[in-house]
Amino acid sequence: MYVHIPFCAHRCDYCAFATWDDRPQLAPDYVVACRAEIDRAVAGGMPAATSVFFGGGTPSLLPAEDLVSILEAIPCRVGAEVTVECNPEHADPERLATWRRGGVTRLSFGVQSMVPAVLERLGRRHDPDAVRRAAANAGSAGFAGAYSVDLIFGAVGEHPADWEATIAEVLALDPPPAHVSAYGLIPEPGTPLGADPTRHPDPDDQADKYLAVDAALAAAGYSWYEISNWAQPGATCRHNQLYWAQGAYRGFGCAAHSHEAWADGRARRWWNVRTPERYLRSMARGGEVVGGEEILDPATRAVEALELRLRTAEGVALRDVPAPGALELLEDHGLVVVEGGPAGEGTGRRSRGGSVEVVRTGRAIDAERRGRAEARAGAGARRSGTRGGEGRDGDRVRLTQRGRLLASEVTVRLLG
């Protein structure tokens, strides 16, 4: 389940989400409407949640009791992960204790940077000391080992030393975060940042900063499991993993999205009306809040599956790659690796131009050679020998570190 809280005290220049900073008076009615929408879904047979995520906007702007009242309306399975996004300046001991008692299991702090000048350029209003207090309060409230920080890199004027300082200070928090998300700044259309080309980030600078955070987090014991996400052992975000695996989810509140798969291989994705006013009017009248939908055919779902799963450390099964002929070139450039079979059965080698150790079974290597030979001979290997053929079912395609920098281009090539 995802619950969208669309209220902010201040809208950042880079934000393109469905959020508003001028409508706090709607919050009490919005809480009531969210509970009513959830009650309606439960009455309609919605199963219990494996995870719940309060996002926005700024969920921590709601009184703690109001947020917990929404959570109380959601049936949850035993052991469900419940995450709340929180601004560091809102992470006071009383709020966090109320959330903890109410069933919240995980926090996500919007840190972005630990350098005041960079925070100012991003339009953030907290300071680094607020982050340090938030971490300490999280630990005292029982969230040690269960909080994440979000970082953004690439703001104009952010020197490499600024980014290195942010990473070092985040790792020095007490207690340290169990999970780190680091995103390259994107000048979204329709935002003040997007409208000002002089503030657009430099892609090469962002690539350098991505490599820097990846190296620092790996050295500190974090593993990347999605392009922009790293976690300590056992601390991955289960909610986001469900999105990347095309699982079923339900969204509540204005602009929230939902998804369900059907037995015939198709799926439905739908979303609520965007503005809080329309959402409140529709709920008050007992009417429908769905603003639109799309039906996904099996072919479209297969494309989305590759796009999503290739972003993860698990990668995709080789049999699901529509254009296996692209693999050799991509691997030669160090952008992907093909792995197969249990550890210890394979032959180790280093991908040319890459930095990821490749382990393949002898059977997988032989099958690859056969597949390439068949392709050169025009034997139709594209659709038979290299897709689910003998010896290839266990193989997976994963991005190397360099491949993560060019993930969109790699995905296009693998899709043919």
Image (cartoon, rainbow, N blue to C red):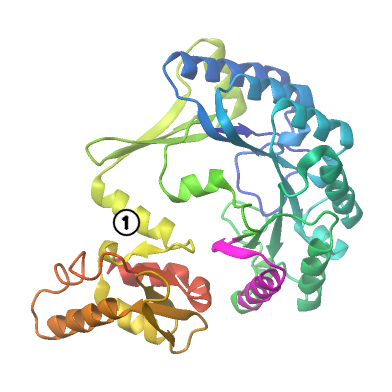
Above/below status of 156 relative to 290 = below
Residue at position x 82%, y 71% from top? 165
| Nearer the observer, 174 or 119 | 174
The number of numbered discs placed on residues in the rendered structure image is 1
Above/below status of 34 relative to 399 = above
**Three-letter code for the amino acid on which mark 1 is drawn:** Val
206 left or right of 308 in image: right
| Nearer the observer, 27 or 311 | 311
Locate residue 283: give its quadrant.
top right
340 left or right of 199 in image: left
Question: In the displayed image of the protein, which residue is found farthest to the front?
Answer: 344
User: Could one spot residue 158 in this view of the protein?
Assistant: no
| Nearer the observer, 72 or 343 | 343
Magenta segment includes 219: yes
Q: Position of residue 1 (x, y in %)?
A: 53, 32
User: Could one spot residue 124 in this view of the protein?
Assistant: yes
Above/below status of 51 relative to 73 = below
Q: Position of residue 7 (x, y in %)?
A: 70, 34
Locate residue 10: give its quadrant.
top right
Question: In the displayed image of the protein, which residue is found farthest to the top?
Answer: 285
Q: Position of residue 384 (x, y in %)?
A: 14, 68
Residue named by callout 1: 303
Q: Which residues are magenta?
A: 207-229
Magenta segment includes 395: no
Q: Residues within 10 Å of mark 1 (few under 14, many from 20)?
A: some
Which quadrant would the C terminus be assigned to in this image?
bottom left
Q: Position of residue 177 (x, y in %)?
A: 75, 55
Above/below status of 256 relative to 47 = below
Query: Under tag 1, what secondary structure?
Result: helix
